[in-house]
Amino acid sequence: MVNEVEKQNMENVSNEKKVGVDVRLQNVTKIFTDKSGAETRAVDNFSVLIPGGKLVGLLGPSGCGKSTTLYMIAGLLKPTAGQIFFDEEDVTVVPPEKRGIGLVFQNYALYPHMTVRQNIMFPLENLKYPKEEMERLTYEMAALVDIENLLDRKPSQLSGGQQQRVAIARALVKKPRVLLLDEPLSNLDARLRLQTREEIKRIQKETGITTIFVTHDQEEAMSISDEIVVMNFGVRQQMDLPQVVYDEPKNLFVAKFLGNPPINVAEGYVKNKELRLISDLKLEDIDVEDQNVYVGIRPEFFEITDDGAISATIELVEHIGRDTMALCIIDGYHETVRAIIAEGRHLQPGQKIKLGYKRIFVFNKDTGERIK
């Protein structure tokens, strides 16, 4: 199913000068079969349009099928069913070396006995480029990723961030149509991770190459992606602009996966147009039919107010930058909520407060789909 963002992407392709290659997956399924004959459906009827010239993040927990999807785009895995297109070219059975892709692995996969120059140049040697052209392109790519002064070093003499840049330069040197990044920052420390993801964003913008970035880290995906595709159990959950996915999650899984601290979720029900927690605490009137639901409130949606619907006692206080996070127990019940309170509030454990909220999500308990 194509959402409004993807429709707009397709209209933009026809109305504007073409930038980059569109990558389209159509009803793609991948099933792995073990020696006993047991099947694992890693990717299930997956369809998505990744617009040319954009950086799109495939985001989801471990085992959700995102790397399998990337390897099918690369040609390293063949789909069990479905088709893969680069623009209008069906590349489903085209071998990796003929697809025009650049692939950067999680472990960098650099040749330890080669210098940085030789590692970057290696794909061009396989393609039998003239020597002068290889030298020019190698230096050009090294300069792009800011390692031109490291060309004569071996990988063992580089930091993790520098090795990652070498891997990116090697992937880009043959001018691929599509750049594929598989968890490229997972081996870096926090500071290098931040620096390198900024570099990846810069490089992608400068080259205009269609880039697909696999990660399980929501902060990485939301900070550098033009759009994100959230996956779970091989199924596409939602694709949209990062902030839209956060602000308007389609289902409970997306709402719970995105957010740090995580969203508060409690069981509830709707009866006679009233939304209540399972503890019978009334939250608000709601114009939906009677049903069992999950109620979600993001920590930053809470506010301390004299007429708040939720009476609570602060159990723990944690300072996060300018703001304060309070772990609160709802009075009279065993439900616990996390509330981020804006700067200027001095809160203490044991303090009684009343919580209101700026926004609330309501999800159908059986399907997980958001109904409010």
Image (cartoon, rainbow, N blue to C red):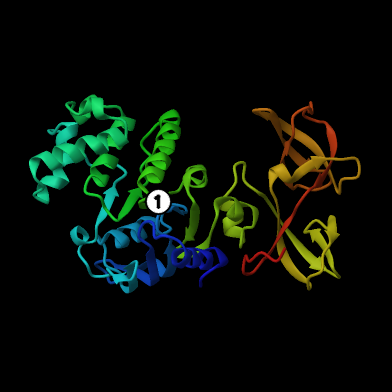
Instruction: Give the image location of residue 79, x and y in percent.
Output: 30, 69
Confirm whether residue 53 shows in the render: yes
Near-viewer residue (176 or 167): 176
Q: Which residue is depicted at the point 33% across and 68% down?
A: 85
**From the viewer's perspective, is 262 left or right of 172?**
right
What is the crowding at mark 1: few (fewer than 14 residues within 10 Å), some, or many (at least 20)? many
Q: Which residue is depicted at the point 16% across and 26% down?
A: 152
> Which amino acid type corresponds to the residue marked 1 in the rendered image?
Val
**From the viewer's perspective, is 142 left or right of 311?**
left
Instruction: Give the image location of residue 349, x and y in percent.
Output: 77, 29
Q: Which residue is depicted at the point 11% across and 39% down?
A: 132
Location of residue 196 by image quarter: top left
Near-viewer residue (267 or 145): 145
Near-viewer residue (105 or 86): 86
**From the viewer's perspective, is 345 left or right of 135?**
right
Q: Name the residue beneath numbered marker 1.
A: 214
Location of residue 149 by image quarter: top left
Instruction: Give the image location of residue 324, x and y in percent.
Output: 71, 31
Confirm whether residue 108 shows in the render: no
In the depicted structure, whether residue 56 falls above or below residue 75? above
